[in-house]
């Protein structure tokens, strides 16, 4: 059988910046390099994000598409990446996300390449999508499941959804999170923060229950540090303004620098995770590696990720009660459980091996 010619599509590119799929792509390149994997690897990148356009990154060849990888252009970006990979003779296409999936019927018609798609979360159900955008995302999800040779889900709850909705099966491969421990902490990042605090970190969107978390902590003595992109929407700006003078709540702008983010995470006493949509969320598995108690929204995705061993809430009163009743003994046990699960399930060595076994297996390697 021929050697795998693998193309990874659907991300901004590598080296990875902010974003779960970019982190995944980067760690797959690093695994490919570290293991000297016997395959040819190419990564599709947005030319707009990499004006210098380096030709390679470690053992991967980089290819550029002159569109934005996110937003309205993402559908065309992914579709052009797919067509270019087919034209170049790649025989294993790893598509991250469903944005370009409406092009898959055409790819299947003119190519024998094997298509592996990570469908991410149930994107069309997110509150931020309305009308036509929601309909396109739902159609894209259908096309991804219908026309991919293999569908990857990052969470058992996604597997259950795909099985019930489409009568199809998925391979389960979650995300790694151990890279969050790689950087030395930068003490400057925490100079103006409380000594110990509860930490929340996410995109500031309604489905991440930002308002719920702020409301819960507004009546508690426990300090809360909340990191997010507050200024990107009226929703975030309004919440930031409402709580800017609160004595125990600190709202921080996004922190992308690894050393600063490590210091902020090191200072956390509790991690509060409000995500209620999607699958295995990268920020959750990253924080689980820090071995501190997790208080998570009680959706099925989070329960699967934490194996039912975190504490869960569905409203602000339940979150406030979870904080108030978290004894030192219970906190220590939850932290121990989170660390054990993270080391057993969410390391990049394990994730990289699973992806490349799946991709190389399609070529008889």
Image (tube, rainbow, N blue to C red):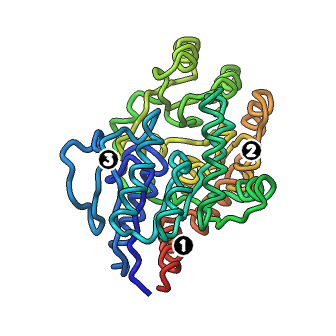
Q: Position of residue 132 (x, y in %)?
A: 62, 29
Q: Image check: 161 left or right of 95? A: right
* Residue placed most toward the observer, 198 or 285: 285
Q: CA distance from mark 2 to mark 3?
A: 53 Å
* Residue placed most toward the observer, 329 or 276: 276
Residue depth check, mark 2 versus mark 1: number of the one nearer the observer: 1
Residue 65 bears which disc, if any?
3
Residue of label 2: 327
In the rendered image, the vertical position of residue 194 relative to residue 114, given as above or below: above
Q: Image check: 16 left or right of 341? A: left
Residue depth check, mark 3 versus mark 1: number of the one nearer the observer: 3
Name the residue rendered at 59%, 32% in the picture: 133
Residue 240 in view here: yes
Q: Position of residue 187 (x, y in %)?
A: 35, 40
* Residue placed most toward the observer, 93 or 52: 93
Residue depth check, mark 2 versus mark 3: number of the one nearer the observer: 3
Name the residue rendered at 70%, 20% in the picture: 219
Residue of label 1: 354
First in sequence, mark 2 or 3: give its number: 3
Q: Quadrant of residue 147?
A: bottom right
Q: CA distance from mark 3 to mark 1?
A: 28 Å
Q: CA distance from mark 2 to mark 1?
A: 38 Å
Name the residue rendered at 28%, 44% in the picture: 47
At label 3, counting other C-alpha atoms closer than 10 Å, the crowd grade (few under 14, some 14-19, many 20 or more) is: some
């Amino acid at each position: 059988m021929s050697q795998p010619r693998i193309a990874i599509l659907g991300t901004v590119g590598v080296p990875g910046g902010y974003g779960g799929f970019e982190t995944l792509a980067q760690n797959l390149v690093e695994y490919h390099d570290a293991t000297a994997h016997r395959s040819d690897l190419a990564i599709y990148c947005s030319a707009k994000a990499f004006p210098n356009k380096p030709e390679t990154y470690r053992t991967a060849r980089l290819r550029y598409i002159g569109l934005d990888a996110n937003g309205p252009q993402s559908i065309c970006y992914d579709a052009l990446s797919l067509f270019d990979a087919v034209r170049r003779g790649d025989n294993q296409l790893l598509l991250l996300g469903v944005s370009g999936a409406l092009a898959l019927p055409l790819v299947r018609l003119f190519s024998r390449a094997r298509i592996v798609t990570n469908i991410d979360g149930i994107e069309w159900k997110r509150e931020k999508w309305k009308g036509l955008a929601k309909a396109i995302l739902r159609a894209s999800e259908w096309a991804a499941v219908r026309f991919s040779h293999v569908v990857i889900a990052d969470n058992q709850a996604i597997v259950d959804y795909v099985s019930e909705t489409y009568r199809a099966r998925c391979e389960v491969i979650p995300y790694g999170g151990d890279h969050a421990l790689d950087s030395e902490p930068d003490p400057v990042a925490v100079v103006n923060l409380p000594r110990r605090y509860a930490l929340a970190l996410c995109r500031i969107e309604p489905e991440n229950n930002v308002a719920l978390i702020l409301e819960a902590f507004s009546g508690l003595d426990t300090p809360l540090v909340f990191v997010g992109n507050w200024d990107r929407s009226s929703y975030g700006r309004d919440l930031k303004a409402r709580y800017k003078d609160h004595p125990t709540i600190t709202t921080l702008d996004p922190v992308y620098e690894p050393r600063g983010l490590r210091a902020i995470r090191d200072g956390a006493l509790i991690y509060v995770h409000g995500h209620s949509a999607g699958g295995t969320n990268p920020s959750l598995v990253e924080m689980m590696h820090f071995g501190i108690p997790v208080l998570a929204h009680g959706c099925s995705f989070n329960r699967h990720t934490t194996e039912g061993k975190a504490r869960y809430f569905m409203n602000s009163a339940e979150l406030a009660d979870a904080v108030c009743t978290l004894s030192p003994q219970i906190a220590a046990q939850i932290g121990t459980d989170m660390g054990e699960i993270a080391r057993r399930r969410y390391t990049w060595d394990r994730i990289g091996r699973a992806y490349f076994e799946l991709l190389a297996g399609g070529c008889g390697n």
